[in-house]
Image: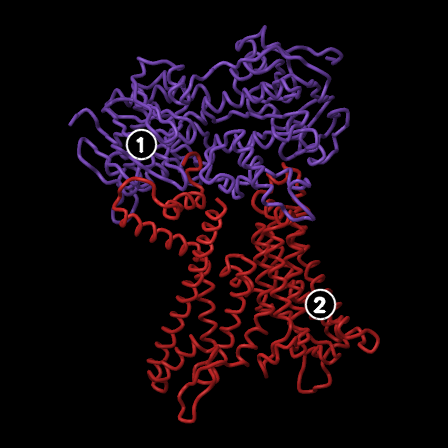
Chain colours: A purple, B red
Amino acid sequence: MQTDNIIEMRHITKQFPGIVANDDITLELRRGEIHALLGENGAGKSTLMSVLFGLYQPEAGEIRKNGQVVKIHNPNDATALGIGMVHQHFKLVEVFTVLDNIILGAETAKLGFLQKKEARRKVEQLSQRYGLRVDLDARVEDITVGMQQRVEILKMLYRDNEILIFDEPTAVLTPQEIDELMATMREFAQEGKSILFISHKLNEIMAVSDRVTVLRKGKLVGTVATRETDKQALSNMMVGRPVQLEVIKGKAQPGQSVLEVDGLCVRGEGRRRDVVRNVSFQVRAGEIVCIAGIDGNGQSELVYGLTGLEKPSAGRVTLCGQEIGRASIRQRGQHLSHIPEDRHKHGLILDFTLEQNLVLQRFREPAFQRLGFLRQGAVRQYAQRLIQQYDVRSGQGPATVARSMSGGNQQKAIIARELDREKELIVAVQPTRGLDVGAIEYIHNQLVAERDKGRAVLLVSLELDEVLSLSDRILVMYEGEIVGELDPASTDAQELGLYMSGAKREEKEGEGA
Amino acid sequence: MKGKVSKLWRREGAQSVAASLISILIGLAVGAVIILIMGLSNPDLGLGTVWEAVRLEFLGLFSTGRTATGALTFGFNPVSMGDMLFRATPLILTGLSVAVAYKTGLFNIGAPGQYLMGTAATLMLALGIPTQVVPAPLVWLIAFLGGALAGALWGCIPGLVKALLNINEVLACIMTNWIAANLVSWIFDGSQFRNLAESTKSAYIYKTSFNGVQTAKLGLDQLFPNSQVNGGILVAIVIAVLMYILMNKTTLGYQLKACGANRHASRYAGIADKRNIVLSMAIAGALAGAGAALYYLSGNTEFYWNTYQSLPDVGFNGIPVALLAVSNPIGVVFTGCFMSMLDVVGQQITNLTPYNEYITDIIVATIVYLSAFSLAIKLLLRGRRKRRLEEAEGGKSGPVDAPSAHAPATDLGRTGKGGGEG
């Protein structure tokens, strides 16, 4: 028995309906190492960690701590064994203060009275020691996502956990916060704490981890030392075939103008003032135009104005020669498909099945209904075709409830639905957010293929890499205005960053003062 | 593939039925315990009476009175059976009203108000149109449709308020309930429809049979002689089937459910979300109004018009009827009959034992309480079966059959955690 393994998960198997989420997976975590767990969406990373944290019971396999077999029936058992977890979606009580959240479930009490003073001292010490800045008296609902994550980390430290699980911790953080988190993780490892780090972001894994275990479709691909591998090799392991990390595309052959926007203004939430101000641009058939910008500079509202989710307060929008400024969403849908920013709010009806979601706009067509009755056989067939063509994976095929699908496959379902409608204009808002390399590669290739079929693509993205590699033209949005048009071939991330931060702008002709 | 899916559905359905039956059994058991406690604490009652009351509690529908020696007799009782169906008629419709709204993401607590408006419209049309001029069956139809329409219009109000102003439908429903209660009292106060012929009664409206307008018996009086049953129950069942088809087979039902499940995504897809919210409430209101119409068109029911102080129970009882049926329109037919059976049971207990019918109110209350837990009971059932299967499997690996593995994912979906992977 090796003693340097603090945790061993041996031959773990965990099944869900129609899917073996973990198939005979063995994972060894050494004391004081940062061990990355890499895999595509739905590869079984979160499931495996949930097994370790006692949220799921495996059908087969055993877990050892320091060589001793342990049974983890629930998170309390896990905590008792020194295992702590920061979930992808934080588990905090929004209306409680930071301090109350940290001590919740591990309160020290005397005669039934909370001993908060002692707890406060301990939390303050931990917070200082690791540079985890938090405001102990602020309410969780009032603090930033980054600080919420620090609260979650302090929760683990407060419970003296020595095995720390981070489930996709960087998905919600800004670049600066990511750097801080990495530094904190390294510090923990130096102190002898052991870290399991779930991610599908190769840069982070290369930067911080000691070893990487790769899962694919519920199976173990292998464990490698980080310094003996590279990004390309890891992504090939993860996807199971050579992956292109760069987008390969030919030169755009723009045709005639599909979308023309002239002086568009859109009100923001509360409708008090315009957050899209006097925006004009056009998108031609056969080109990908990208709206770049830092989140919250009016990109979402611009898309709402174009797709009809919000009525513009001024300006003209012309789609395929028709003025659509006042047209309904359904009328616009005849020429436009929309991959929405928020796939849970707008993209899918989570409680509907996959097949019901795939005909969300098309159910009125004669192919899918007769005299007001849904042709369920036709819907099923259509769904099966899309599932196959776009490789949407789910437990029970067309009858899978959308909520139970992995994020990547939910997004694939939306992409399938929108691209298959074959409309002249495709509006794609952050289509690859939160997805793994395999899915990103797939979606990028799909968008390029649509472009080459002569469709106009308007892409809104926050990722600089994506903007630079995918677009044929870049429009930079800053504080609701388009401040520059750039050619991706002749610009770079630095210049783009200057425009995005408002430090640089092109003066438009004909715009006084 | 197809067979597999329908098998799963049946399993899902079977679980719902089992959960509802367990709620019902616990409710009946609590009733029996109360009967026992009352019996033991009262020297006049004794264990013999307790045993009689408990037997009636479970089998009251089949009670046929006592023999000459005083023993309870059981058998087919056409009067009880027919009365059960008669009383189930409005309950099925208010149950459908709540169930259809619930399926479209709305909680229709406004059924009592819609029911009252339906009552008023039905009675005014049935009594107001002279049958010398218009043939009675036509008046019946006009009165029925008028009742449904009045309910629909009343249901539209909370629907509009929700769709346009985003005000919670529960608040608007409660307010429109009381507006209806006062409005109806005011409409009938001093109207020509008050029953003045029978001087012993005050504040009652004429029966619709006064004008010769009553629901045809359709031969049901042959099956259940001397009971109040009429063709209304058949109309209710037909409507339930139509609602099942509407919700599950049509594009309209698809749209209504889509708006209920995710208003934003429906709007994104070009579905008129506001129109559908109003339409859902209108359909719900029409169902409650139709329930009132069928009840008062029976010809042997009288409407007590001083409603400003109380709302009709049958409106609120639609909620447990729908809950017990897990909002399945076909299930509502059975749960509606069950709730009215409890009424009949209460009567039998009152008639045959020193207990009174309020014991059935306690049973109903317990069942209502538990029906809210039926989801929890369902999850419990799944957990049990999964554990048993696991024990049988002995933790060995290899594919387990679908139903046992079905449990965790649905739990997952319900509680909404771990949406990412799995």
Quadrant where the N terminus of chain A sits is top left
The chain carrying label 1 is A
Is B321 positioned to the left or the right of A31 in the image? Answer: right
Q: Amino acid at mark 1?
A: Val
Q: Which residue is mark 2?
A: B144
- B282 above or below A420? below
Question: Residue sitting at 30 percent across and 29 percent down?
Answer: A164
Element class at badge 1: helix
Residues at marks 1 and 2 touching, judged by CB atoms closer than 8 Å: no
| Picture coordinates of residue B169, whole percent (x, y) | 61, 52
Looking at this view, is A109 or B106 the one in front?
B106
| Distance from Cα at disc 1 to Cα at disc 2 | 70 Å
Q: Nearer the viewer, residue B32 or A436?
A: A436
* Residue carrying label 1: A123
Q: Is residue B337 above or below residue A308?
A: below
B123 and A272: which one is in front?
A: B123
